[in-house]
Amino acid sequence: MNQDRARVIEDFPEKEFAPLPTMETGAKICVRNQFLGDWSSGFAVAEVVHHGYRIQRLSDGLVFPDVFAVDDVRPERRQEPERGIGGSHLDRGN
């Protein structure tokens, strides 16, 4: 029986396994919505665990008990400030 189990494990190439976490605790992140497939911001990594993360909702500090897969979490992208009112401008020294 051990031989059969070893053979089955060898049949799976290493790339088929889930990727390891690369973000650190406290990193601001977006989380994939499992129902709609879109991304929601307003979260941070609360804990890094094997092959995933426990996340914290920033609005109220709630830490979710579930482990989120590495593929369902990505770094939050900072939005560029709008140009125009309050945006950057060149001082031409008039």
Image (spheres, rainbow, N blue to C red):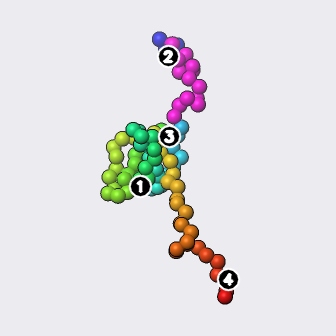
The local crowd at label 2, few if under 14, some if 14 to 19, many if 20 or more residues have their Cα within 10 Å, is few
Q: Amino acid at mark 4?
A: Arg
Q: CA distance from mark 1 to mark 4?
A: 39 Å
Look at the numbered disc 1 and give the secondary structure of its residue: strand
Residue 33 rendering spot, x and y as whole percentages: 41, 43
Q: Which residues are magenta?
A: 4-18
- Mark nearer the N terminus (3 vs 1): 1
30 lies above or below 80 = above
Residue depth check, mark 4 versus mark 3: number of the one nearer the observer: 4
Residue 76 rendering spot, x and y as whole percentages: 50, 54
Residue depth check, mark 2 versus mark 1: number of the one nearer the observer: 1
Q: Nearer the viewer, residue 21 or 79?
A: 79
Q: Which mark is residue 92?
A: 4
Instruction: Judge from the rendering whether residue 84 lies leftward or rightward of residue 30; answer left or right.
Output: right
Pointer 3 with pointer 2, Cβ within 8 A: no
Please give the residue where the numbered disc 2 appears in the rendered image.
Answer: 5
Q: CA distance from mark 3 to mark 1?
A: 17 Å
Q: Residue at x 64, y 81 (%)?
A: 91
- Mark nearer the N terminus (1 vs 4): 1
The local crowd at label 1, few if under 14, some if 14 to 19, many if 20 or more residues have their Cα within 10 Å, is few
Q: Amino acid at mark 2?
A: Arg
Q: What secondary structure is the magenta-colored segment mainly?
A: helix
Q: CA distance from mark 2 to mark 4?
A: 73 Å
Please give the residue where the numbered disc 1 appears in the rendered image.
Answer: 42
Q: Amino acid at mark 1?
A: Gly
Does the magenta-highlighted stretch encompass residue 10? yes
